[in-house]
Image (tube, grey):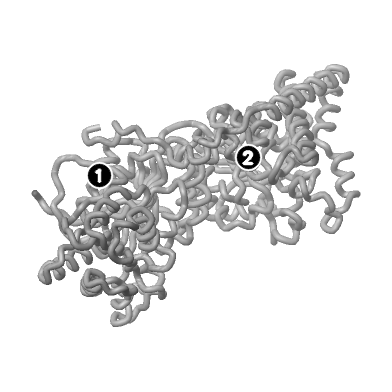
């Protein structure tokens, strides 16, 4: 880390969230964890085909940031995208339907786990090309500035994506043009099956600072800290003070994807246990809620049980839901254009 | 009718559409004060300002990606790629991102973006500034591809491209920027998927795109003097392709040559020839021939470069032999 990088740990005296905001953040984190537990089960039991990448362990990042956004603010997401999707307001039913390739999924079953888009909540979609959405996020921010709209775009990507050249091209333009975009690097310590320190030379935040972008390294397991900083940066983006860069230190509990089970050749079970037992964002925040008198243990247990039940019902719904009809296969290749707009004088 | 250059025609289309729709903007390298190296955009920044005619760093994947994001969220970007050869640099943004958003989202998202770029050899620009890469993008579902063959098409197709709700790659022939053609003063648009029968004939059909339309017309003039009547058809857009007009022509003439400046191997000529074989087979008196650019990197030396592109004489010779019943391969 360079001397200019601001390391953020939450000040004890900071004014905290309201009870409602705090419970919502807790709920959203548990909804992500529960979604992933069910998705993992669907895969392991052979009910779900294809590739999927678990967000478990990183919940405080998506929730801390997305709780600072409104529905008109945009995000771009990654192959490890279920967490961003839930945090930005998506519902279980359409998400599970999408994971199982059903017609009622967010993308009519045509996207799958790695391509869920939910434009009603400003989610421009997950992207299965590592770093592939950095241009999209920056373009969304350029559109806001060009059309005089005050929304902010957050570009989620992993530490692995800092190795893609596109990041440097778009950070340069975002900085030149002062665009309302926040580059949120989720550093979970691993670039697929390789330790980040083996693929990233130097400092990650210094990459952004080289463009004159204000960069912050944050404890990504602390939802309050992430949220507090995000609120400030989103407000500054709206005031034309962007772009910003966040490096969020976090951890991915599962392998790179659900099939990456035997992974001791690249990381130890001891390391995994340490993060799960000592730094889990949900356990930490639950303890804080109780300590602050915001919720009783029994209320939290009831909340968790309700979310589990919601997930169970959504999974059952998705399993029983219909696949798209075969006539769908060549629908939506091209968007329709109203013929009236293609006439002269229109 | 007045005559203007292809460059002026593109400029007019952009001005008209940018006046019409405040969500349109141009983004690319040296598009503002420089007006691009070909000066096609001269005067635009003076009218629309630097917020709508945006100069970028030399970062092709970056600014194409930015175009995709702007298009996804409600703007209509016109992305300027200085040379068609740079398409290789932007393939992920164009083919994995722009082309697939509408389908992957089940029809919820769309990318109304124009990528304008160019093609064409014989400008002595070497192997990396002379390619005609329309086949690369035409291969990808989700992208439309327009190939204007004159100032008239350049204006009408550009206006349609900007209003279309899909990613459209429009590739101009950089050797034709100063070529004049009649262009009406009043507004017009050319619909996609409607071929233009440039010249009617009865003995052989010459299907030609972009720069090769002039070559086919010159070949038809040579053939006419020998008593061979060639029909010349310009598809104008290769995606969507007006198969019907092409097939009807071949059913009438029974012979066809397809001419395009992209490499012949696995190219546009092969695709169109194959469709004619599949759908007009029983009407054919000869194999459908392909004539693309030679399958070599474009050489610099003028004597070599000129050999790589189809010529009127080459097209006429192949047409002559097809009409004489010789089973030949295209040179």
| Residue B55 position (above or below residue A341) | below
CB-based contact (under 8 Å), mark 1 and mark 2:
no
- Identify the element where label 2 is drawn: loop
- Identify the element where label 1 is drawn: loop
Q: CA distance from mark 1 to mark 2?
A: 37 Å
- The answer for which chain carries disc 2 is A
Relative side of B193 to B265, left or right? left
Residue located beneath label 2 in the image: A112
Q: Residues within 10 Å of mark 2 (few under 14, many from 20)?
A: many
Which of the 4 image quarters holds residue A249?
Answer: top right
Q: Position of residue A323 (x, y in %)?
A: 61, 32
Q: Residue furthest left?
A: B1
Which of the 4 image quarters holds residue A41?
Answer: top right
Relative side of B110 to B4, left or right? right
| Residue A88 position (above or below residue B277) | above
Q: Nearer the viewer, residue A15 or A118?
A: A118
**Residue at 76% in and 36% down:** A42
Relative side of B135 to A15, left or right? left
The quarter of the image holding the C terminus of chain A is top left
- Identify the mark at residue B190; answer none if there is no mark: 1
């Amino acid at each position: 880390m360079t001397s200019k990088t601001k390391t953020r740990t939450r000040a004890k005296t900071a004014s905290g969230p309201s009870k409602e905001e705090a419970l919502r953040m807790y709920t959203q984190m548990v909804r992500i964890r529960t979604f992933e537990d069910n998705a993992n089960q669907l895969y392991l039991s052979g009910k779900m085909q294809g590739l999927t990448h678990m967000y478990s362990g990183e919940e405080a990042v998506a929730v801390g940031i997305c709780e600072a956004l409104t529905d008109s603010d945009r995000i771009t997401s990654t192959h490890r995208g279920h967490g961003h999707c839930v945090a930005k307001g998506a519902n279980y039913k359409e998400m599970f339907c999408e994971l199982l390739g059903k017609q009622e999924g967010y993308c009519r079953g045509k996207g799958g786990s790695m391509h869920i888009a939910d434009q009603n909540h400003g989610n421009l979609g997950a992207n299965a090309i590592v770093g592939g959405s950095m241009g999209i996020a920056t373009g969304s921010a350029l559109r806001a500035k060009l059309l005089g709209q005050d929304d902010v775009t957050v570009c989620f990507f992993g530490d692995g994506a800092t190795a893609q050249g596109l990041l440097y091209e778009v950070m340069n333009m975002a900085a030149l043009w002062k665009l309302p975009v926040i580059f949120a690097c989720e550093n979970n310590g691993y670039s697929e099956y390789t330790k980040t320190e083996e693929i990233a030379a130097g400092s990650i935040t210094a990459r952004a600072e080289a463009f004159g972008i204000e960069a912050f390294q944050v404890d990504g397991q602390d939802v309050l800290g992430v949220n507090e900083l995000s609120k400030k940066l989103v407000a500054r983006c709206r005031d034309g003070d962007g772009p910003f860069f966040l490096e969020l230190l976090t951890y991915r509990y599962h392998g790179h994807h659900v099939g990456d089970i035997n992974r001791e050749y690249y990381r130890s079970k001891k390391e995994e246990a340490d993060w799960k037992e000592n730094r889990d964002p949900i356990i930490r925040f639950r303890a804080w809620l109780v300590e602050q008198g915001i919720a009783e243990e029994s209320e939290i247990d009831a909340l968790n049980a309700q979310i589990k039940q919601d997930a169970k019902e959504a999974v059952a719904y998705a399993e029983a839901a219909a696949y798209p009809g075969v006539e769908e296969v060549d629908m939506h290749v091209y968007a329709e254009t109203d013929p009236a707009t293609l006439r002269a004088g229109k | 009718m007045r005559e203007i250059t292809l460059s002026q025609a593109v400029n007019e289309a952009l001005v008209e559409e940018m006046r019409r729709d405040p969500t349109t903007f141009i983004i690319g390298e040296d598009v503002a004060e420089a007006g691009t190296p070909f000066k096609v955009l001269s005067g635009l920044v003076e009218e629309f300002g630097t917020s709508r005619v945006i100069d970028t760093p030399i970062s092709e994947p970056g600014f194409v990606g930015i175009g995709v994001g702007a298009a996804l969220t409600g703007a209509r970007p016109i992305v300027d790629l200085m040379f068609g050869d740079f398409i290789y640099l932007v393939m992920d943004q164009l083919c994995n991102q722009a082309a697939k958003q509408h389908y992957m989202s089940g029809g919820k998202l769309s990318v109304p973006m124009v990528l304008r770029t160019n093609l064409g050899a014989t400008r002595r620009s070497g192997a990396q500034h002379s390619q005609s890469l329309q086949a690369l993008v035409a291969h990808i579902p989700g992208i439309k591809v327009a190939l204007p063959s004159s100032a008239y098409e350049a204006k009408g197709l550009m206006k349609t491209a900007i209003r279309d709700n899909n990613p459209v790659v429009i590739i101009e022939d950089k050797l034709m920027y100063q070529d004049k053609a009649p262009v009406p003063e009043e507004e017009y648009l050319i619909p996609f998927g409607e071929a233009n029968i440039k010249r009617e004939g009865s003995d052989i059909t010459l299907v030609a795109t972009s720069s090769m339309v002039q070559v086919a017309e010159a070949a038809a003039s040579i053939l006419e003097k020998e008593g061979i009547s060639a029909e010349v058809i310009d598809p104008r857009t290769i995606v969507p392709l007006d198969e019907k007009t092409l097939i009807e022509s071949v059913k009438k003439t029974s012979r066809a040559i397809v001419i395009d400046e992209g490499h012949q191997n696995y190219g546009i000529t092969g695709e169109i020839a194959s469709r004619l074989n599949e759908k007009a087979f029983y009407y054919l008196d000869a194999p459908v021939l392909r004539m693309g650019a030679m399958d070599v990197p474009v050489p610099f030396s003028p004597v070599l470069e000129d050999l790589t592109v189809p010529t009127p004489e080459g097209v006429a010779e192949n047409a002559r032999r097809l009409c004489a019943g010789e089973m030949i391969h295209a040179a």
